[in-house]
Amino acid sequence: MGVIDNLLLGLGVALTLTNLFYCFAGVFMGTLIGVIPGIGALAAISMLFPITFHLDPTAALIMLAGIWYGTAYGGSTASILLNIPGTTSSAVTCLDGYPMSRQGRGGVALLMTTVASFIGGSIGVVLLMLFAPIIADYALEFGSADYFSLMLLGLVAASTITDSSAVKGLAMVTLGVGFGLVGTDIYSGTQRFTFEVIELGDGISLVALAMGVFGVAEVISSIGKVDATTIDPESVKFKAMRPTRTDLRRSWMPIARGSTLGSFFGTLPGTGPAIASFMSYALEKQVSSRPEEFGKGAIEGVVGPESANNAADQTAFIPTLSLGIPGSPTMALMLGALMIHGINPGPRLLTEQPEMFWGLIMSFWIGNLFLLILNIPLIGIWVRLLQVPYHMMFPAVLAFIAIGSYSVHNSVLDVWMVVAFGAFGVGMRLLKLPAAPLLLGFVLGPMMEEHFRRAMLLSRGDFATFVERPISGIVLGITVIFLIYAVYSAFQVSKPKRAKAEPA
Amino acid sequence: MKRDYQDIITGALVLAAGGFIAAYAASNYDLGTLRRMGAGAFPFGVGVVLFVLGLLIGIPAFFRGGTFQTISVRPAVAVLGGIVVFALLVRPFGLIPAVCGLILAASIAEKTFRPVAIAGVCATMAVLIFLIFRLALNLPLAMFRWPF
């Protein structure tokens, strides 16, 4: 099938009324939750994804994806108007977005962000369409040893490139793999680490873990820190949003550069949107003829990173869908949701379920269009929502977390697990342990074990198989470099302070 | 001599977790052979790796200074307590009373007590929950229940 056929197939799926509705619903709810200060993409997705369990897989996937980039948009609104980043990548948007809104140019910043995100996202989608099938084709030849090594690289890269220490990231990723062990062993049927609790035989609930560690812990740390009284409602009126000619002229090159950077970094394991937006910001500052304006409301510092993180958001689907290996915690969550629906992402997804794959991709575009519509004329609603006092907002958020975790299996145990993981998440913040790697390890752990054991079975117990297979060998080599860096940085006595950002 | 006690504690906890996983796996599950690994082999490996990472976090911390992170206890207790209340109430009394209980308990997080705001949030949530979970999604969740 040619590209055109695929596109038509995808459009046919994405444009059915039900799927359009769920796409819209996802984007709408994503924006709604994303705007709420302190709730990042991960928390938002984990809150909302129980809702999708009751849909058919394609609709669920379309809605989840909508929720995801909806949150990204909503998060940038909160960053620009209130200086509260919901995600690591929108922390960059705060740097110049918030100063712009202090100067009464918040509306312009929001509009340009929306446009930049749309362009970045579109470029990402095109690349996804072009490359995912090629990679999937190639990946059909991958063996278990290759998969194991690729996953290992993904985990190691994602945990060493964090904003806290590399060994702590590695420890959390390993602990995540440990949590993933709980449940029935697929080979022998042994109940592992279930401690006689029958319900644990199915493993720890992904929803409970994600909601506890991200949702609950984020709510706790935002209480008392959010103040929405500084927004000037005049600056975000539709009329005040129109960018000047200078704004436009200064924006298009950063958008182009940001999209390119973002597309590239999105595909790499472990880097993703956050790194892409930091890189884009640094690059714009470097090439700008007015570097002194950065941090004081330079529009380049808003549109570049925003287009970068949206492009990365889309290209991050390339490894997730074509290899079944997520590069970022958010993608891990998407992958987890897919598996709950009984779909195994991987090279075969494209050939076995082309309607789903292409339908999803076309829905990205439609979703991005919806976002444009939702965010420009309706921005007033989101701003009004930001002004709801946080003491009324957070109990409502918590209620949805509790109901969401309860409704998945109608199980009270899942709610208790949210409490336990919430407490755990608070503890992790106390000890400055990054939470994102934990989730990544939790999702990838069981798959890694399966591939590891299968590879060892095939090689008759010979570890050399991981080095002798060319793909696996090269990937492991790269992994070792990351590990050496991690150990080296652990022993550095005075570590240079890196840019601090809230873990997403 | 300055020491980073926070990271020493972190390292010790990670090390303990790793040690526990490895020991528990080795003593309760079949390790198998390299060729045909048992249920305990991979967990054992995970435990060992975690143990080593605990050392890597903890040992360097003896040679540098550090600060303690602080966290306000009140919101943490109130928020977690709210979810506990939900877990206790949802089976016997149904969804809406459980949510109201959660909201009430969680609002202790703020120092000022705002009865009107709390009642407003409860009422809004009750309506929303009914609309979303009963009418739109049609989930089999009991809204109200009377256990006696």
Image: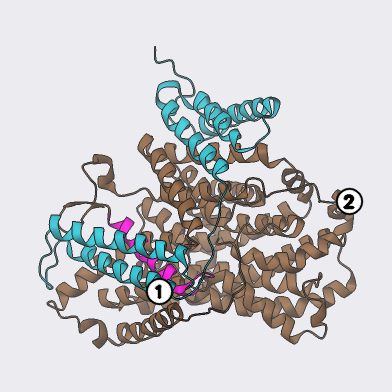
Chain colours: A brown, B cyan
**Residue that appears at 61% across and 41% down:** A394
Tell me how many marks there are: 2
**Residue that appears at 47% across and 81% down:** A492
Nearest to the observer: residue A455 or residue A213: A213
What amino acid is found at the position of numbered circle 2 in the picture? Glu
**Quarter of image, res A440:** bottom left
A302 horizontally vs A186: left or right: right
A116 horizontally vs A242: left or right: left
Residue A170 lies in the magenta-colored region: yes
One can see residue A63 in this view: no
Q: Which residue is mark 2?
A: A234
Q: How many other residues sit within 10 Å of disc 2, few (<14), some (14-19) or many (≥20)?
A: few
B70 horizontally vs A482: left or right: right
In percent of width and height, residue A427 lies at 46, 53
In percent of width and height, residue A35 lies at 67, 51
Chain label for disc 2: A
Q: Which residue is mark 1?
A: A156
